[in-house]
Every structure is written in structure tokens, then in C-alpha cells.
Amino acid sequence: MLYALMGLGLSLITGVLNIPNFAHGALFAIGAYLLASVANLIGNFWLALVVAPLGAALLGLAIEYLGIRRLYAAGHDYQLLFTFGLALILSEAIILVWGPVGYSHLPPPVLRGGVDLGFTFYPKYRLFVMAAAGLLVLATWLFLEKTRYGAIMRAGIENKEMVSLLGIDIHRVFTGAFALGAYLAGIAGALTAPIRGLSPGMGVDMLGIAFVVVALGGLGNLLGAIAAGLLIGVTQAIVAAHWTEASSVVIYAVMAAVLLVRPQGLFGIR
Amino acid sequence: MNRALIAILAAIVLLPFLVRPAIASEIWIFAIFGLGLNLLLGYTGLLSFGQSTFFGSAAYVAGWLMKIHGLNALLALIVGAGVGALSAAVVGYLCVQRSGLYFIMLTFALNQLFYFVAYQWTSVTGGEDGMPGIPRPAFLGIDFGNPVAYYVFVSVLFLVALLVMRRIVESPLGKILQAIRENEVRAEAVGYDTARFKLAAFVIGGAFSGLAGVLYAMLFGIVPLEAIGFVTSGNVVFATLIGGSGSLYGPVIGSFVFIWLSESVSTLWARWPLLLGVAFVIVVLFFRGGVVEAWARFSAWRERKWRSSRQTG
């Protein structure tokens, strides 16, 4: 479900803005680190869970407004270089601020321990993450499908010129989409922190996964991102249970296998 | 013989006097790597963000064969180019069917696939520690343990690679690739199987990357995990773009600037990738078009100034 969340955010950014966002993983890592710091500082996990993704969204806002906005006409190569440069800066900044060694962050006391589900024993926090991620995906979907702003964003994916001809400031749509995507990446990071711990490399690992989700699900195809996120997550969980070493490779192997059979991705038409 | 080639020959001769031979060698090795990418990026219009897949795979395979089975230098280079071409054929086959952003993301995702295999397969690759102990086998009785001898070897291979690449881009194949860059639909309408030509570009680019990978492993005696990581892929894209992807010599200039830049900042500060990231951002925001274009703009400006001063004076 977390993969779906990451993929959803990236799908939105790449779909609406038509840029390769290599900084998406860094935003995810920033969300995680902000959560840990804020939670330690104020001692309240829930408040931190609200604040951390907002921080990532603000950062996303700044990145779009100050940098990417000037690059829409520049071609993918320069956009890629720019976001890749940002990813390097952010991950090095994380090392500078929080140190190169990874550490773990405990979930809040209420969510520690596990629940007996009858057939298996499952950690409470993971159940919470599943529910929270599910709700967020649902909320994002409702926002995009049922509200006016969501309709404008989807229209932006379909045809940018048309949207601006209708008197809508497409640049504000772009900024909004980037901030929303950054928010989703940030909250995915924040939710992940107590499960996987924090390390400077977490962003890049997640970036690859997010790309796989988008490549399989289709750019701007939100249901596709959800489906692909679930497919990848479940496959990885099954493989990890039997052959731990292969669990990071299997994501990409699944992608390669799907692309062999369906070069256009799971639901892609292009 | 043209001016660019003479300038490169002069640079090859002068470089060892300016920097350490290891860095001088690294510049030409990286230039070979860049030439391979530029066939895709500059000539075919394919932005591959997974070039280190071919670079790293070749370095690992050839390195392993040299280390364990005592393969000689020439064979190692042939094996490396072959591994590079083969891995590029696999990756290319999966990627050329998609275009634009999908293409970029797929090259990156497959790069990650190879990266994680190298990361987990510690018994062969050494995982995070890298694969140390790569020898520099002698060739034709020349001992490449001497850094200067190895530099000459690398320079000669670079010149051969450059001439081969020039021949390729000026050949009918090169023209077709450029036609695909300009207008793929039209190239297809004229009757070319564009997917096959793009795959060909991939395979040739992969062979160049593989060659560079083996030379790199022999230079440093180790295949670090980063050799197959995405940062290496990003670096070669950066080097090619700052050099100017539109010209044959762009990646050569770019690799010169990039290696010099990274070598000088990496000694300053352990967190130098931060500075590198800042450099990427600055170049993209203010110096798009790269060194070659900046130079062209500068000479145009100088010429204008010269003309106007002649008119007034």
C-alpha cells in the first residue's frame, strides 16, 4: 500500500508536469527524517505525522516554484539532470544533518506490539500503516475524481493547452500537483520510518520502486498506480518470506517480466 | 585531420604533465563511456539513465575473469565490450518499445535491477565492499603496472574509440539514427524499423560502456559497487550534457570538465556529491547547451565585437 502511495504521488507529478522527477525518493526520505526529528522533539507521534509531510510538500512547492517552473521548455535531459542534482543535494543534506548511519524510530506506544488475527500474529503498527495508506489513497482518488481541482489536474494530464485556453492558470495547477505529489511522498516516508528505520539511502531505493509502479501502472493513471503498487508490494512480501536476499531484485524482475508480455504496462495504451 | 582531432592529440600529450596519470587515464576512460551514451542521447535522442548497467556488468565479468582465470588484457577488453553489448541488448529490448518519460524510468529501473544483483551477490561481487584485486595484465610484453604505460594504452584505445564512433555517426546507420531523433514517426513511415535501429544504437553504446568499464576496473584495481549504481549513470549524462550532446566531441570535453571538477572537489570535502548536485542545478538553470555551445556563443560575440571595432576604427 505504501508503494501505491509513492507511485500515486510520482504518477501525478510525472503525468501532470511531464517531467522525470528523480527527487521523488529524496522527498520520501525527507518525510521520514522529519517525522523522526519532530516526534523526538515534541514527543508526539501524531502531530509529527501531520507536520512531516507538510514539510515535504512545502519543499516540493519551493522546488517547483524556483526551479522546475523554468525548465518546462528545456527537454527531459535537463529536467532529469536538475531533479537528479536535487536528489544528490537532499540526500547529502540528510547525511549532514542527521549523520550517515541509519537508525530506527519506534512507533508510538499505542501501536506497539501485535494483534492475533487467528491465523497469524501481525504487528499493530503495520495494520495501522495499511489502513492509513489505504485511506490516503482513497482520499487522493476522491479528490482527483470528485472535486473541481481534481478535475482540473486530470484535465492537465490530458491536454495542457486546452486547460490554459479555458482560462485556468496551468502553472498554478503544476505547482499544486507537485506539492500534492511531494506530500504523498512525504507521508509515505513518515509512515515507513517506524517500520524500516531511517537511512540516507532509503530515498533512492524507494525511487526505483516508485518508477516501477509508474512504468507498470501508466503515467497519470491513478488506478493503475494503485494496482501496480499492490502487485509489487505483495510479490515482494511473498518472496521476502522465502528468499530474503532476492526481495529487492524481485521488484525489477517482475517489472521486466510484465514488460516482456505487455510492453505498454499493465493498463497502458501508449 | 581536423582541428578538433589535433586539439585532442595535444591534450593527450599534455595531460599527464598537468594531472596525475591515474586521473588523466580516468578522463579518457570516462570519455569512451560518454561517447557510448552520446550515440543514444545526442544522435538518437534516447535519454538513457542506465548506462552504468553496461559499464558495471562488463567491469564485474571481465574483472572476475582476469582475477580468477588470469585472462589477458586484450581478451578482457573484448569480453567487456561483449558483456556491455549483451546487457545493452537485453535492457534495450525492454526499453525501446516505450518512449519519453517511460523510457527514462525503465532504463533507471533496470539499472537498479542490476545494481541489486551486484549488491546481493556478495560471493562474487563483494557487495558493498566492491570487487578488489583486479590485475592489470601485461599486453605484448608491456607492463601496465607502470601508470604512464597504462595511460598510453588508454589513450590509444580512446583514439580508436573516437575514430570508430566518428565512422559510425557518419555512416548510413548514423544518419538513420539522427532521422529517428528528428522525427521518429517520419523515419518509420519512410520504411525503417525504428525499434531495431534504436536497439542497434543501444548495443553499440553498450559495447563502448563495457570497454570503459573494464579499463576503469584495470585502472583502479577494483570494481566498486558504485560502478553499477545510478549515480554513475547520472554522472555520464551530466558529463555528456555539459560537453554538449549535439556534437561528437561534446562528451570528450564534458568528461574532461567532469573528472577535473569531481577530482578537485572530492579532495576538499567528504560530502562533495552535495557540491556536484549544486553544480548540476546551476548548469541546468543557467548554462544549458553545455561548454561547446557556450564557446560558440562566446566566439560569435567576439567576432561581432571584432567586426564592429573594425567598422568604427
Image (cartoon, coloured by chain):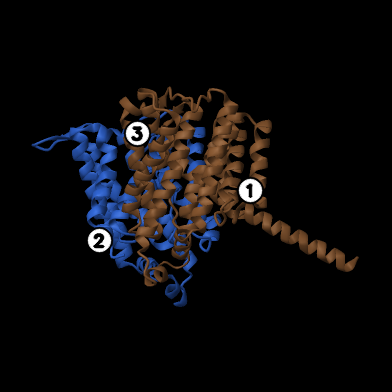
**Residue farthest to the bottom?**
A166
Q: Label 3, secondary structure: give it.
A: helix
Q: Residues within 10 Å of mark 1 (few under 14, many from 20)?
A: some
Q: Label 2, secondary structure: give it.
A: loop
Kind of residue at badge 1: Leu
Q: Are marks 3 and 2 in contact (CB under 8 Å)?
A: no
Relative vertical location of residue A35 with respect to residue A255 in this rendering, above or below: above
Asked if one can make out residue B10 in the rendered structure from this viewpoint, the answer is: yes
Check chain identity for marks 3 and 1: say if they share one. Answer: yes
Relative vertical location of residue B189 with respect to residue A133 in this rendering, above or below: below
Q: CA distance from mark 1 to mark 2?
A: 50 Å
Kind of residue at badge 3: Ala
Q: Colour of chain A?
A: blue
Number of the label disc, if any, that sits on residue B5: 1
Q: Are marks 3 and 1 in contact (CB under 8 Å)?
A: no
Q: CA distance from mark 3 to mark 2?
A: 31 Å
Q: Which residue is mark 3?
A: B118
Residue B268: image x %, image y %?
62, 30
Point 47% across, 52% down: residue? A60
Nearer the camera: disc 3 or disc 2: 3
